[in-house]
Image (tube, helix red, strand yellow):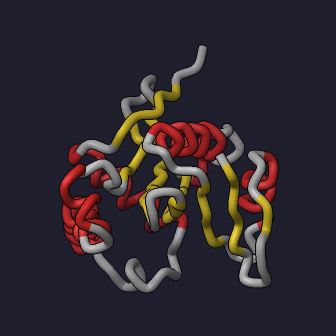
Amino acid sequence: MNTIKIRKFRSSDLTSVAEILQNAFPNAHEFRGSTSSKIKRNLRLQFKYGKLSVIRRSLEELLTNTYDEVVFVAEDISKNKVVAVAKVGPITRDVWSLRQIATLPNYSGRHMGTQLLKRVMAYVKSKGGQKIQLYVRTENASAITLYTKLGFTIKNRINLMTKDI
């Protein structure tokens, strides 16, 4: 029985998402030397006001409110715990950017990333998006394997990967 449910982020997920991101990206400037409460405050502001950068892109996006950034989580419903997160947002109407995807270490290898990424791709397609792009570190072999398995291709030396959907 599958105990994982992919759903949109809720504010009650904030503590779990902060833990996931801090574990996944310990050297990221936004997490380095930060307390858990500071990370949660920054994430709350980021999730709440992230669409402001999108709104600046075009009047159409402002008026239709169709192209907001979205955060999905993978919840282990048997433990009532969020164990993975993915964040995607538009660059243009057609091109979207996967901005973050991360899993708790003890859930690694359980296909959370695959499930989240498939949900992200379906969401982007439902919004009229035609391409998803992301950046991945060269040394992140497991992520590159995941993205390649799902049809992404490396476009340049800085590991910009894209997928037409």
Q: Position of residue 128 (x, y in %)?
A: 48, 45
Q: 24 or 150, which is in the foreground?
A: 150
Q: Quadrant of residue 49?
A: bottom left
Instruction: Look at the image and tell me whether residue 98 can be seen.
Output: no
Q: 126 or 6, which is in the foreground?
A: 126
Picture mark count: 0
Residue name at image x 26 percent, y 42 percent: 10
In this rendering, the answer to whether 121 lies above or below 59 is: above
Q: Position of residue 27 (x, y in %)?
A: 52, 82
Q: Quadrant of the N terminus?
A: top right
Q: Position of residue 86 (x, y in %)?
A: 48, 52
Question: Most extreme residue toward the front, as rendered?
Answer: 60
Q: Position of residue 18 (x, y in %)?
A: 36, 61
Question: Most extreme residue toward the top, as rendered?
Answer: 1
Residue 136 vs residue 93: left or right?
A: right
Q: Quadrant of the C terminus?
A: top right
Q: Quadrant of residue 79?
A: top left
Q: 51 or 44, which is in the foreground?
A: 51
Residue name at image x 48 percent, y 80 percent: 28
Residue name at image x 52 percent, y 71 percent: 25
Q: 164 or 151, which is in the foreground?
A: 164
Residue 127 vs residue 1: left or right?
A: left
In this rendering, the answer to whether 142 lies above or below 45 is: above
Residue 38 vs residue 157: left or right?
A: left
Residue name at image x 54 percent, y 65 percent: 24
In this rendering, the answer to whether 20 lies above or below 27 is: above
Instruction: Look at the image and tell me whether residue 122 can be seen.
Output: yes
